[in-house]
Image (cartoon, grey):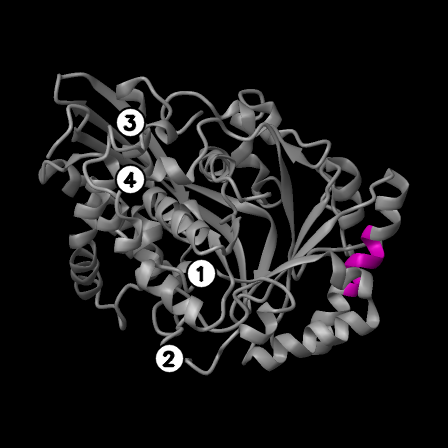
Amino acid sequence: MSKSTDVRVVSAESRTEHFRYRTPIRFGGRTLVEATLLDVAVEVETRSGRRACGFGSMPMSDGWAWPSKTVASADALAAMIGLGRQMAQAAVDGGASGHPLEIAHELGQHCAGVAETIATAAGLAEPMPRLAQLVATSPLEAAIHDAYGRALGRNSYDVLGGEFVNRDLAAYLTDEFAGEYLDRYTLRRPKATMPLYHLVGALDPLTGADVAQRIGDGLPETLGEWIRADGLTHLKIKLAGDDLDWDVQRVVAVDRVAAPVQAQRGCAAWFYSADFNEKCENVEYVLAFLARLGELSPEALARLQYIEQPTSRDLRAHPENRMHEAARIKPVVIDEALVDFESLELSRRQGYSGVALKACKGHGEALLMGAAAQKYGMFLCVQDLTCPGYSFLHSASLAARIPTVAAVEGNARQYVPEANRPWLDRFPTMFRVTDGTLGTGALDGPGLGF
C-alpha cells in the first residue's frame, strides 16, 4: 500500500568533475593520481504536488571498484559514468516512485542489464562488477534520498520509519527483520562529534627524511606534521599484503613517529586500523602479521582497532579464506566483498566479524547493511573513497547516524584539498580539523543534512 509521502522522480541531470591528486595514493598494488566525480541532481514530486531538488556526488573510483587486468582504466571509468547517467534517466523515464528505498530497489532490478548493454556496446572484455555498478549509481540514490527529505521538510534519516516506508526490512533482508524499519537502527540526531580517521598511504612520508621534494603549499607533508596540525588520534595504515616484513615494519615505523608526537601533545590514547586491500594470500599471513607485530611492538598491536579486507573480495572463489582465528584477535572487516546482503551472510560464515560501510555503495544499501550488522553484533565502521566536499559530508552523515560507528575516515583533505575548498567556510567543523574530531552535529538539516 502506497503512502501519501511517496514521491516520483520527475527530472534528473548529471555532470562530471575532475581533480588531480595533490599526492598519489598507493594501495592494493595500484597507484591513483586523479579523481573523477559524478554529480547527479534530481527533482521529485510528492503525491500532493510538492516538488524539491536533491543532489548526490561520488568519485567514480574504477581503480578500487573495477581493478581489471583486461579493461583499461579509462574504459572502465567511462562505462561507470555511462551507467550512472543512464540509470538517472531511467528513473525519470520509468516513472520511479515510492520511498527512496523502494525506488532504489526497483531501479536495482534493471541495473545489471543496463551495465551489460554498456559493456557489450563498448566491446569490453569483461562485465562490469557489481561493486562498480553500486558506485556508479550511488550519486543518483543519494540525490533521491536528499530530495525526498527536502520535499517533506525533514532530515532524510528521520523519514525511515513505518509511517514513510511501504515495506519493512524483511522485504530487503530476511524474516528476522519483520516489523522493523531503519529508524530502529539509526539515530534521530547526529552524533555531536566523531573522531577522524586519517589515511597513511603506502607512499606517504612519515618523517622529513622520506620527503624527496616538499610540495610547499602550506599543508602538512609528513605524518608527524599531520598529527600536530589536525590533532589526529586515528590512523588508517595501508599495507602491502604480500610483503610481511614491510607490513610489520611499516606499522612499527608509524608508531615510532606517532608515539613521541602524541606524548608531546599529551594524548594518552590513539588508534590504528590496518588495510590490506585484499592482497593477503590467506589468513595465515594475517596471523603472522599480528604475531610479529606483537613481538616487535606490543603497544602498536594494542592500538590496532581492526583489520580491513585482508584477502580477495571474491569470497565464493576462495572459501578456504576463513577469518575465524584472526577475528578472535582483532575485528576483521569486510569491505570490497560487501555488495549485498548475500555477501554479508557469506562473510559471516567465513569468519568476518565486522562490516565497512561506504556511501559509495548506495545510501540505502549502506543503511540496510548497517542494520543487519547491528542485529548480528558485528563491528561497524564507515570508510572513505577519497570523498571530497559533498560526498564526504554524505559519508560523514551516514556515520553520525549509525549508533555503533565510532569514527569517520576522510582523506580528501590530504589528497584533493582543492575539491574541498568551496566547503571550508560552509561547514568549518567538518573541513577545518584541529582536535582530531569532526563536528558532525552540524549535519542536521533537511535532506541528507547539509
- Which residue is nearer to you in this view: 408 or 86? 408
Residue 88 point in image, percent of width and height: 21, 41
Magenta stretch in the rendered image? 252-258
Of label 2 and label 1, which has the lower sequence position?
A: 1
How far apart in space, not on screen, are marks 1 and 4 (Cα)?
Answer: 21 Å
Badge 3 vs badge 4, beta-carbon distance below 8 Å: no
Q: Which residue is mark 3?
A: 147
- SS class, disc 3: helix
Can residue 253 be found in the magenta stretch?
Answer: yes
Residue 212 point in image, percent of width and height: 77, 56
Categorize mark 1 by other alpha carbons within 10 Å: few (<14), some (14-19), many (20+).
Answer: some
User: Which of the image's four quarters has the N terminus?
Assistant: top left
How far apart in space, not on screen, are marks 2 and 3 (Cα)?
Answer: 40 Å
The mark found on residue 317 in the picture is 2
The mark found on residue 116 in the picture is none
* Three-letter code, disc 4: Leu
* Three-letter code, disc 1: Gly
Categorize mark 3 by other alpha carbons within 10 Å: few (<14), some (14-19), many (20+).
Answer: many
Q: Which residue is mark 4?
A: 140
Of label 3 and label 1, which has the lower sequence position?
A: 1
